[in-house]
């Protein structure tokens, strides 16, 4: 091969290498450009995903805020609805009712949009802000209505206090008048100065009324003690007489009076309150009545701890005052322990109880002094009211149009004395 041929071949080889280098450089440049483009697209996609998630969170937050604002609006409207019922405000009731209906409709729409995942909101930040402001407004409105309601209740209570003070003053004047009459005619026992041969049902009624008064004094003391011990008086009254709806919340006191009467008069129809009691003659019981009527209960039971009356007081106390009640009212069981030991505690409560028990015992002795022994009776729940045998402690049941009053429970038992009926006191429903 000559020199010119070799040179030509060499030039061709250089040209090929040069062309290959150019192609390689170009290929590398295009690859780098493609890689950079792909990376840029990935970054943009990630940013879009993040932005989408942030928007979804903002939209959900706005939705929840709108939900709570609507619920607070319903609560506010319901409070307004209750407030407008007393005193009755027709326009206020109608306005509140319309708001409740509109808000319930909004709630339904929010529910549907959530279930269908249509929570698109172009301005979630603004929606969130406005919803929170609306919720705060509704809360303030609810508090204002509550304050008005409490203010009205306070005014009502103030009126009740004024009324009760006037009634208390009236009762005090009446008591002073009665006291003067008693002082001018002798002691209370002198009102019971009737002899055995001239016994009349009116004599029994007189003693019975004083006994009932003594029981009510004991009941008042018990209720005050239960209130001081933070008892739920409504629950306690329900436990005594279930399923009784009271016309007035203050009427629950009749349930406690009923309970005390039931316990104290239990066994009244048997001589000495026992099926095995001694069937003594009428004169025996009347002499006991005469002996005990003017005596102080504590003085007698302390001097005669083995007497029938002392035993009666112990038995009735243990039945009437449950250990849990005693623990709650007095913080211990010391009174119960003393009674079980045959002693009589020196407390205000026990003095009231002793006086009450003595009066029941004295009434019992008088009942067996009659030729036709006075027997106690009560009326069962659900019985129709009868003016012959009953007297109602509440009048509300008779004021309801078209109502036929029924007995809710017997508060104070009645008595049958020969052909004479002494009405029992009942709570009517």
Image: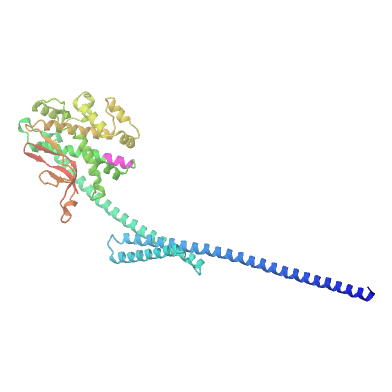
Pick whichever, 190 or 357, lies toward us.
Answer: 357
Task: State the quadrant of the N terminus.
Answer: bottom right
Answer with left or right where residue 206 lies relative to residue 157: left
Q: Is residue 136 above or below residue 357?
A: below
Q: Which residues are magenta?
A: 221-228
Answer with left or right where residue 406 lies relative to residue 239: left
Considering the whole magenta stretch, tell me its main secondary structure: helix
**Is 203 inside the magenta-drawn segment?**
no
Residue drawn at 68 percent across, 69 percent down: 37
Q: Position of residue 288 (x, y in %)?
A: 13, 27
Pick whichever, 291 or 258, lies toward us.
Answer: 258
Viewer can see residue 177: no
Residue drawn at 27 percent across, 44 percent down: 238
Viewer can see residue 126: yes
Q: Position of residue 260 (x, y in %)?
A: 22, 37
Residue farthest front in this picture: 1
Q: Position of residue 173 (x, y in %)?
A: 19, 46
Q: Is residue 383 above or below residue 399?
A: above
Answer with left or right where residue 65 lies relative to residue 390: right
């Amino acid at each position: 091969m000559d020199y010119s041929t070799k040179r030509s071949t060499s030039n061709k080889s250089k040209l090929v290498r040069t062309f290959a280098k150019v192609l390689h450089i170009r290929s590398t440049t295009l690859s780098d450009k493609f890689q950079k483009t792909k990376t840029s697209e990935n970054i943009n996609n990630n940013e879009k995903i993040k932005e989408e998630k942030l928007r979804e969170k903002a939209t959900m937050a706005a939705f929840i805020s709108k939900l709570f604002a609507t619920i607070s609006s319903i609560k506010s409207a319901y409070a307004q609805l209750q407030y407008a019922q007393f005193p009755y405000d027709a326009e206020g009731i109608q306005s509140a009712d319309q708001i409740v209906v509109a808000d319930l409709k909004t709630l339904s729409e929010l529910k549907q949009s959530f279930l269908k995942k249509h929570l698109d909101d172009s301005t979630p930040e603004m929606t969130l802000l406005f919803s929170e402001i609306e919720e705060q407004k509704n809360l303030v409105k609810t508090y204002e209505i509550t304050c008005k309601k409490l203010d009205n209740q306070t005014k009502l209570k103030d009126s009740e206090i004024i009324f009760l003070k006037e009634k208390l003053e009236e009762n005090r004047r009446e008591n002073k008048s009665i006291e003067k009459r008693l002082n001018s005619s002798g002691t209370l026992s002198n009102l019971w100065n009737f002899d055995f041969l001239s016994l009349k049902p009116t004599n029994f009624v007189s003693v019975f009324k004083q006994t009932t008064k003594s029981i009510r004094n004991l009941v008042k003391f018990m209720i005050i003690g239960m209130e001081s011990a933070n008892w739920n008086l409504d629950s306690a009254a329900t436990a005594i007489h279930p399923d009784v709806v009271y016309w007035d919340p203050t009427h629950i006191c009749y349930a406690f009076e009923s309970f005390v009467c039931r316990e104290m008069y239990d066994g009244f129809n048997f001589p000495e309150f026992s099926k095995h009691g001694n069937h003594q003659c009428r004169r025996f019981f009347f002499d006991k009545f005469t002996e005990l009527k003017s005596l102080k209960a504590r003085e007698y039971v302390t001097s005669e701890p083995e007497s029938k009356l002392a035993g009666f007081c112990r038995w009735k106390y243990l039945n009437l005052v449950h250990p849990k009640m005693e623990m709650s009212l007095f913080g211990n069981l010391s009174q119960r322990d003393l009674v079980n030991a045959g002693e009589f505690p020196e407390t205000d409560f026990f003095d009231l109880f002793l006086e009450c028990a003595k009066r029941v015992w004295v009434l019992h002795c008088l009942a067996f002094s009659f030729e036709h022994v006075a027997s106690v009776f009560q009326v069962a729940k659900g019985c129709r009211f009868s003016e012959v045998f009953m007297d109602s402690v509440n009048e509300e049941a008779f004021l309801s149009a078209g109502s036929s009053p029924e007995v809710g429970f017997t508060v104070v038992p009645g008595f049958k004395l020969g052909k004479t009926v002494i009405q029992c006191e009942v709570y009517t429903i």
